[in-house]
Image: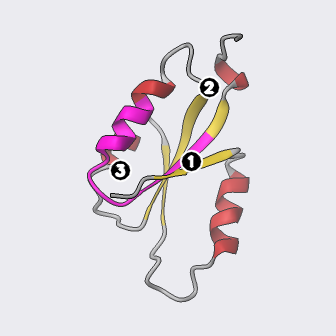
Amino acid sequence: MALLTGSNKIKTAVFISGTGSNLKSLIKFSKLKKSPISINLIVSNDSKSKGLQYGKIFKIKKKIFDFKKKHIDEKKILFELKKNRIDLFVLLVL
């Protein structure tokens, strides 16, 4: 298998809601030369989620959606993914 570097990696968004311990592991994995992914966007439903700090530390874009409001629908989420050219998304559920 060929090594994936730079722009050859799959641009990935990660959906989080908590402390971000799984996100941290994914970010560390994405930094490895052999990793097929790069984390380009973090999406959360909580602006106070501790996991968003990893976005700041590793300079990853973040987007916060209030899923409790009825006006947030999949079109807005898909628009954000498309805008950031995301090819894959990961939903981290506890």
Real-space CA distance between mark 3 and mark 2, rounded to the nearest whole angstrom:
22 Å
Residue 53's place in the image compared with 83, above or below, is above
Q: Nearer the viewer, mark 3 or mark 2?
A: 2
Mark 3 and mark 1: Cα distance apart in space: 13 Å
Q: Position of residue 41 (x, y in %)?
A: 54, 47
Q: For the residue labelled by badge 3, is the local secondary structure a helix, a strand or a loop?
A: helix
Amino acid residing under circle 3:
Leu
According to the picture, the residue beneath numbered tag 1 turns out to be: 13
Query: What amino acid type should be assigned to the residue bearing mark 1?
Result: Ala
Q: Is residue 23 magenta?
A: yes
Residue 7 locus on image (x, y percent) = 71, 24
Question: Considering the numbered disc 1 on the image, is that residue within a helix, a strand or a loop?
Answer: strand
Magenta-drawn stretch contains 17: yes
Mark 3 lies on residue: 52
Neighbour tally class for label 1: few under 14, some 14-19, many 20 plus, Cα within 10 Å:
many
Secondary structure under tag 2 reads loop
Above or below, 2 relative to 59:
above
